[in-house]
Amino acid sequence: MEENDKQQRLETFEAEALGFAGQLFRVALRVCRDRGKAEDLVQETYLQAWRSWRRFELGTNLRAWLYRILFNVHYSGLRRERLELVPFEETIAETIAYDPPTPQHLTEEEVLMALERVPRDFQVPVVLADVEELSYREIADALQIPIGTVMSRLHRGRKLLRMELADYAREAGYQIVN
Amino acid sequence: MDCRNFKDLLDSYLCEELTVETNHAVLRHAEHCGGCRSEMAARRQLREALRRACSKEAMSVEACERLRARLRAEARSGVLAGGSASGVASLWRRFVDRFLSLRFGVPATAFAALLILAGGAFGLYLMGRGGESGNPQVDPTPRAVELSALLMDEAAEDHRKCAVKFVNNAVLATLPDSIKTLDPAYVDLDKALAEGTKGLSLHSAHVCGFGARRFAHLVYTRDSQLISLLMTERDARAMKPGALPPNAAPADDGSLSGLQQTSRDNFALGAYQTAKRVVLVVSNLPEAENKGLAERLAAPVAEHLRRAERQVSWERLNPRDLMASLIRF
């Protein structure tokens, strides 16, 4: 009896949650910068999610819940690194007063390389907002930082990304109209 | 609303995070301002490109299957929870899980602190032992494993894209201390190499990423030649597929081994490895000169890593690892 019940719960869990594995992996990849580590992170996230599945209320936002677990797992793995901006990166971001116009006609590869150059603390919120389309509130929950911080990181992250892209565009010889 | 305001709000507008009123204000401004309209189109395109680019990365089929298998195994073992025979094991596992997730209050924290102290003492003991010279159990030279073409590609690309970009950059010529959060061995790398790089001028010392890889990157020039010294993690992706796994290397005392040479486009690459890191010299120099430079730098790099490793072993002690290792006893 109990076995059947468990089996059914697992099936529900798989049906509801496993569909997000791809999205979680993409974010994990940005966070870990390594495929193997990203796969481990996703796996650990699902194991934790399964262990807490009883506590999840069906009908509430499952994806945001999974992201929260993912960052929880990630942070507990590197407790010390949590939300510690590398100070010089912070300085770089602060000093950008100039907001470059957004270049066009860049390849996906160039966009990805530019994204990689954005410091992780800014890169991750940008990916969560612009690729995964989480709301600012959901990002704040997932990263466990105040929503104001989310907004300022997004602002700087997107600006840094545009600056990197403008660099590529210049190198590639595209004209940037200001 | 002026253009500056508009640009500040534009991304939030595209994310549908603005109030109805602000939305209207944004749209009203765009109606009257051609420049801002095209900026809006450009950012929308950028979002699309970003989404497409990131969506290309998919989890491998094998990883998905491993995930399913793990879940099923977890569910099966969980079925017995509460049963008398396996109850203890399951309770113990839950206890350990709770511990590792570090989500608990004061008494456990105190216990953790105790563990750290004990672990610290143990670590000191180990470090003391490691410091003894001629320890017969430790083979001091890590085996040189053939490095992957992927790593060589990444290094050459990083040299091409990044060194060129930074060569005119006179702002940051030394690595800031803060990079130790990335890899403590990056600290003072530039200073350690000052002697070996006489005759070259240092233009930039920074940390950069290429794809999923991070490099500590020193950019040098000599006359019109551009030289990159790159240091990165010796992970599985840095190894040629089928070569020994990275943890097969026995010692981690910064010993270098096996200078490997190759070339990409017009760049010469020389690479050597320690147990944890790969160091690459990439340049437009003729191959023999590049090799000479790489060889000249081998000794100071080795010395630097040896010193860094020794300091790091202390700083790296982290409660989770410690508990994990203690629990394994």
Image: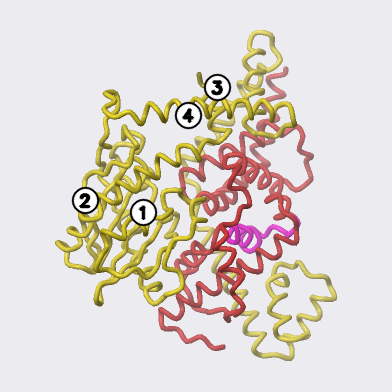
Chain colours: A red, B yellow
Which of the marked residues, 3 or 1, is nearer the chain's N terminus?
A: 1
The residue at 64%/37% (across/down) is A14
Q: Amino acid at mark 1?
A: Met
On the same chain, marks 3 and 1? The answer is yes
Disc 2: which chain? B
Residue A130, horizontal then vertical, whole percent: 63, 64
**On the rendered structure, is B149 left or right of A42?**
left
For residue B148, say whether it is visible: yes
The residue nearer to you, when weighing A75 against A30, is A75
Q: Residues within 10 Å of mark 4 (few under 14, many from 20)?
A: some
At 82% from the left and 70% from the top, the residue drawn is B19
Gap between marks 2 and 3 measured at Cα: 40 Å
Query: Where in the figure is residue B264, as x and y percent of width and height?
Result: 25, 63
How far is the residue under mark 1 from the one under mark 4? 27 Å
Can you tell which of label 4 and label 2 is closer to the viewer?
4
Disc ID at residue B231: 1
Whether labels 1 and 2 share one chain: yes
Does B22 appear in magenta?
A: no
Circle 1 marks a residue in which chain?
B
Q: Are marks 4 and 2 on the same chain?
A: yes
Residue for badge 4: B123
Residue B265 shows in the view: no
What secondary structure is found at the residue carrying circle 4? Answer: helix
Q: Are marks 2 and 3 in contact (CB under 8 Å)?
A: no
Chain letter belonging to callout 4: B
Mark 3 — on which chain does it sit?
B
Secondary structure of the residue carrying tag 3 is helix
Q: Which region is colored magenta?
A: A121-137
